[in-house]
């Protein structure tokens, strides 16, 4: 059984919006001992990059420079799905988006800031002009 399940991907035009969801397949993120959830993406031929991370115990978050101001990672309350609201999408945002869960490493200066050991299978986001 895949630990995490992503949904919400799709095809949109430049400037559009999508909202991705990441849920734990076994009850809640805390079931996995996780207090950090992150979103990563990978475009064809490129390395995977971290997009956004949230420390669920405090609700604090960190974003990649390329999405800062356009994407928002959130969780309504503890043990609920984690969302990635993506606005003003650009062609370079195209890729497979994965969520991951793990433990916060203690510092937002670390890259990635969390030690991820549970992953989903991904959801495709395609942005076209």
Image (cartoon, helix red, strand yellow):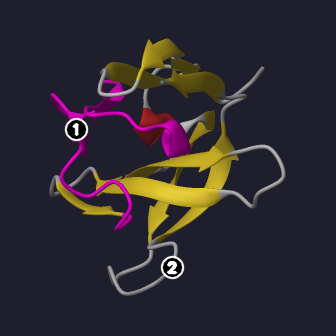
Q: Position of residue 69 (x, y in %)?
A: 18, 53
Are dots 1 and 2 in contact, CB under 8 Å?
no
Q: In the rendered view, tell whether residue 51 sits above or below residue 29.
A: below
Figure quadrant of residue 17? top left
What residue is drawn where x is 37% and y is 56%? 53
Q: From where the camera sits, is residue 81 visible?
A: yes
Q: Position of residue 62 (x, y in %)?
A: 29, 64
The boundaries of the magenta stretch are 64-93
Q: In the rendered view, tell whether residue 103 sits above or below residue 86.
A: below
Residue assigned mark 2: 111
Q: Which mark is residue 43?
A: none
Mark 1 Cα shell of 10 Å, populated few (<14), some (14-19), many (≥20): many
Please state if 62 lies on the left or on the right of 90 as rendered: left
Front-lying residue, 5 or 62 = 62
Q: Position of residue 57 (x, y in %)?
A: 22, 54
Please state if 46 lies on the left or on the right of 53 as rendered: right
Mark 2 Cα shell of 10 Å, populated few (<14), some (14-19), many (≥20): few
Front-lying residue, 76 or 69 = 69
Please state if 9 lies on the left or on the right of 78 as rendered: right
Residue assigned mark 1: 74
Does label 1 or label 2 sit earlier along the sequence? 1
Marks 1 and 2, how far apart in space? 20 Å
Provide the secondary structure element on which disc 1 rests: strand
* Extreme residue in the right direction: 45
């Amino acid at each position: 059984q895949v630990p995490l399940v992503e949904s919400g991907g799709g095809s949109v035009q430049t400037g559009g919006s999508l909202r991705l969801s990441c849920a734990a397949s076994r009850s809640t993120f805390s079931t996995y001992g996780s207090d950090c959830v992150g979103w990563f993406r990978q475009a064809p031929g490129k390395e995977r990059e971290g997009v956004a991370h949230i420390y669920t115990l405090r609700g604090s978050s960190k974003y990649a420079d390329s999405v800062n101001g356009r994407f928002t990672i959130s969780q309504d309350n503890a043990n609920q799905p984690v969302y990635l609201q993506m606005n003003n999408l650009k062609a370079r945002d195209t890729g497979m988006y994965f969520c991951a869960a793990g433990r916060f490493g203690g510092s937002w200066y670390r890259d990635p800031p969390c030690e991820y050991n549970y992953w989903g299978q991904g959801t495709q986001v395609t942005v076209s002009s």
